[in-house]
Image (cartoon, helix red, strand yellow):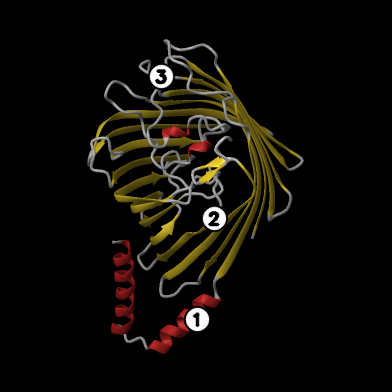
Amino acid sequence: MKRMLIQGVVGAMLLCFMTAGWSAAAVLDDLTAALKAGKADVGVLTSFEYKNRDDATSPAKQLSIRTRIGYQTGEFHHVRLYAQFHNLTNAWEEFRHADGGDSDRDLIADPDGNRLYKAYFDYSALPQTTVRLGRQEIILDDARLLGNIGWRLNGQSFDAVTVTNKSITDLTLFAGYVNQVNTIALTHVDLDHFYLINANYAGIKNHHVSVYGYLLDTESKADSARDSATYGVRIVGKPCIVNYAVDYTLQTDFADGEDHDADMLNLYVGATVAPVDFGVGYSYISGQDGDDRPFDTLYSTAHKFNGFADLFLSTNGGGLTPGLQDYYARIGTSFFGVKLSVIYHYFDSYEDDHFDGTYGDEVDVVVVKSISDNLKLLVKYANFMQDEDEGNGFANPAVDTEILTARLEYSF
């Protein structure tokens, strides 16, 4: 279907040129001019990661080099083309991943390989509207439900057609149709349908309000299918020195999936008193409650939330059966061009049918230094400490975990 759609659009464009009286030479001249007016981009990321879980496996060690090379054409009759090639090479691969690796070592989700990470065209003839067709990143709101998983080295993109419209003042309307997800494991997930609707209103001073609905229909026809309908609202504000964010999301049945009756709530309030910004937050994600399945955070950038030790990534796919309550506090500052953030998390479960206790707590430290306009250094450390008390007779599903990551990124 995707190939037929692309062929149909290209054919329609050629037909328009012919009926409008364009000669082949004129079209070729315009195309040549668009290619010459294009712009290339290059990104090279060197990454070292050390991961140690307190279990039977040995620590994981990784040294990788990721290269991305892209090119965007100039405008050709309201059309711009963009393509980006991606390569990941693991120079030091002492870790387990989805494609193999060392089975006795901890998991790092970065198999090496090549891929066409992005390949799309933008059509902008309609007023204040961009239609994008092809392989693309989709990042909506804070990426809590739809994102590019930008922390992992391979990233996540979607084969989709999306429409973004800004014809109404202060209102951005987004609609999308996805039929394939290109995962961080360099695999592909085919979907029957994945419909995306997101409306963001910025007409209230220093505030943004988003409402959204995401309808997922996988290829599975079983009652246990991941198929679901996800609806929510998000409000972000920054009055004076205070900033806050609140979102609530409800998940119900859709297509073939059954027993979806779950929800998620995120709250954050902070303030900035230069050079320090700080805040506290709470995240609630429902788990398995009787026949009702856990909340599924869909295709989110899960690493961004609930601790950088990545103990709760199974929220993507609805695999966190005990549910989650995350109480956290953060503080950040800048000095001599260095950005420093420290975050503390206290993780508690929610459902008592599987584990009724405290998972543990975690300390995260992030240091970012821009060495030049094109070169950036990042160091991130995460230390999760398991609570040793059993909950309601169930063993704690989380274990002590340390992760240290250092990255040097060059881009132009």
Distance between mark 2 and mark 1 Cα atoms: 32 Å
Which disc is residue 350 wearing?
Answer: 3
Q: Which mark is residue 59?
A: none
Identity, as a three-letter code, of the amino acid under mark 3: Tyr
Q: Quadrant of residue 125?
A: bottom left
Circle nearer the viewer, 3 or 2: 2
Q: Please tell me which of labels 3 and 2 falls first in the chain.
A: 2
Residue 180 seen in the current view: yes
* Element carrying mark 1: helix
Position of residue 351 relative to residue 294, above or below, is above
Report the disc number at residue 113. Answer: 2
Amino acid type for the residue under numbered disc 2: Gly
Q: Secondary structure at mark 2?
A: strand
Give how far across and how far down residue 346 sits, in percent: 54, 20
Dots 2 and 1: beta carbons under 8 Å? no
Q: Which mark lies nearer to you, 3 or 1?
A: 3
Q: CA distance from mark 3 to mark 2?
A: 39 Å
Sequence order check: which comes first, mark 3 or mark 1? 1
Q: Nearer the viewer, residue 89 or 350?
A: 89
Q: Residues within 10 Å of mark 2 (few under 14, many from 20)?
A: some
Numbered disc 3: secondary structure: loop
Q: Amino acid at mark 1?
A: Thr
The reply to whether residue 166 is visible in this rendering is no
| Left or right, residue 306 beside residue 52 | left
Farthest right residue? 336
Q: Residue 2: x percent and y percent?
A: 32, 62
Q: Position of residue 62 (x, y in %)?
A: 64, 43
> Label 3 vs label 1: CA separation?
60 Å
Looking at the image, which is closer to me, 329 or 361?
361
> Dot 1 corresponds to which residue?
32
